Amino acid sequence: MQIAQQMSIFRGIAEVLNRSFTLREALDAALYRIVELLGVRSGWIFLTEPETEQLRIAADVRLPQALSVAGKRRMAGDCRCIQMLRNGELTEPVNFVPCARLEQVLPQATESHRHASVPLIAQDEAVGILNLWLPPGREFTHEELSMLEVIAHELAVTIQRARLFDKVRHQEKILRDLLQRLMLAQEAERRRIAQDLHDHAGQMMTAIIIQLAQMATRAEERQDANAAALRRLHDIAQQGLDDLRALVHELRPSVLDDLGLVPAVRSYVDRVVKPAGIEVDLHLLEMAHRLPAEIETVAFRILQEAVTNTLRHARARRVEVRLDRRDRMLIVMIRDDGVGFDPEAPGIGRGSLGLHGMRERAQLIGGTLQIMAVPGVGTTVVARIPLPEDPHQPKGPSRLEAP
């Protein structure tokens, strides 16, 4: 085989491996290219299952019809090439391996009862076998076997890389699931604490306020010298109750549970943002149905944290709060005209003010968070949260409801 032909084969295999998105797609495309370029009758690949160490067929091209029927049942189980791999006898490409499967389906064609076998080895780990069914009288040259060894190594590396990626992705999913359960547990605990504060501490303080008001009124009627002190105590207790109610709302706004995301955002803006003296440009999407609870919670917490940062640090005169829906994506945007900051600056104070928490919340449900800030211009926070399929939701930008 000419060097130019070998290079063409290598390039072809490399191209299909690089542009494939899944391991199955990569193996199918590479095997088809190998069979075509080498002019063999058929080819198939066995892969080792990491959990069981058993080999199963993972790809095939032009498999004999008798081996393809019944879900390729005849390709399951041990055979000579698999035994050779297990016993450490198949460490390099072999031209002739007797095949019991071919003997069973082609009993009369004795010259076709063999195939070439190439072990798929990378980093001293055998991950499978590449088998190529040669035409009668054909055998690979030494150069072709050497080329197949190189190709097999590339396939083995691709397999190892894909499995490592799947393992990492699986571990990341486990971590996301654990963090999501932690987030749900935190929200449940917030709800419980808020309810306890409302039901117990709130009622006790309300009773104290009523009694102080009555005592102050009676003292004022008697022109008692303690009347002014009682009235001050009453005012302090009332302020404490107001602060307690604000804390309860911060822990878990009941309107979020009862009415949903849009009413909760509007209530938050009316209760927290507008009293701060900041002009608010509010755009909220119309929703015929409630979103899943975890999406509403994440969207509200991101908006709450971003607005809190604006109130505390931005020295803004105007803030824009927007909820939008584009196809199957919920868009949460908060933009202010405050002092801004440099997101890349080391040790920047704003970096510890919940930005990481907002991004982590978005990622837990498959979303993203983008922060755009320019010193002296302002800050924009955009969260994109995927939504479940809704057959009643038309595609395209949603209508927005202005306050």
Image (cartoon, rainbow, N blue to C red):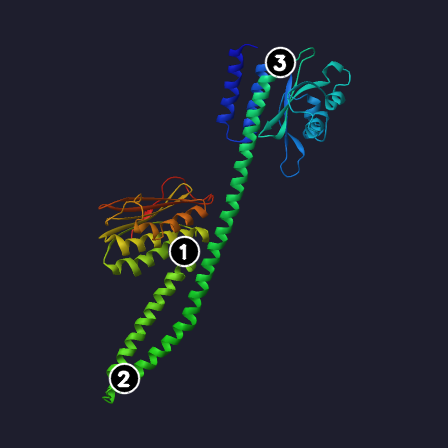
- Spatial CA span between label 1 and label 3: 71 Å
| Residue 127 percent coordinates (x, y) | 61, 30
Residue occupied by mark 2: 217
Q: What residue type is labelled 3?
A: His
Q: What residue type is labelled 2?
A: Thr
Residue at horizontal 31 percent and vertical 83 percent from the top: 214
Asked whether disc 2 touches disc 3, contact meaning CB atoms under 8 Å apart, the reply is: no
Please, is residue 182 above or below residue 344 in the view?
A: below
Q: Which of marks 1 and 2 is in front?
A: 2
Q: Which of marks 1 and 3 is in front?
A: 3
Tag 3: Cα neighbours inside 10 Å, few (<14), some, or many (≥20)? few
| Tag 3 secondary structure | helix
Question: Along the polypeptide, which appears first: circle 1 or circle 2?
Answer: 2
Residue occupied by mark 3: 142
| Residue 128 percent coordinates (x, y) | 63, 29
- Residue 65 is marked as none
- Spatial CA span between label 2 and label 3: 108 Å
Viewed as shown, does residue 40 lie left or right of 281? right
Q: Depth check: give the residue in front, 299 or 94.
A: 94
| Residue 125 percent coordinates (x, y) | 61, 31
Residue at horizontal 24 percent and vertical 90 percent from the top: 222
Viewed as shown, does residue 137 lie left or right of 197? right
Residue 27 falls in image quadrant: top right
Residue occupied by mark 1: 260
- Spatial CA span between label 1 and label 2: 42 Å
Tag 2: Cα neighbours inside 10 Å, few (<14), some, or many (≥20)? some
| Tag 2 secondary structure | helix
Residue at horizontal 55 percent and vertical 23 percent from the top: 29
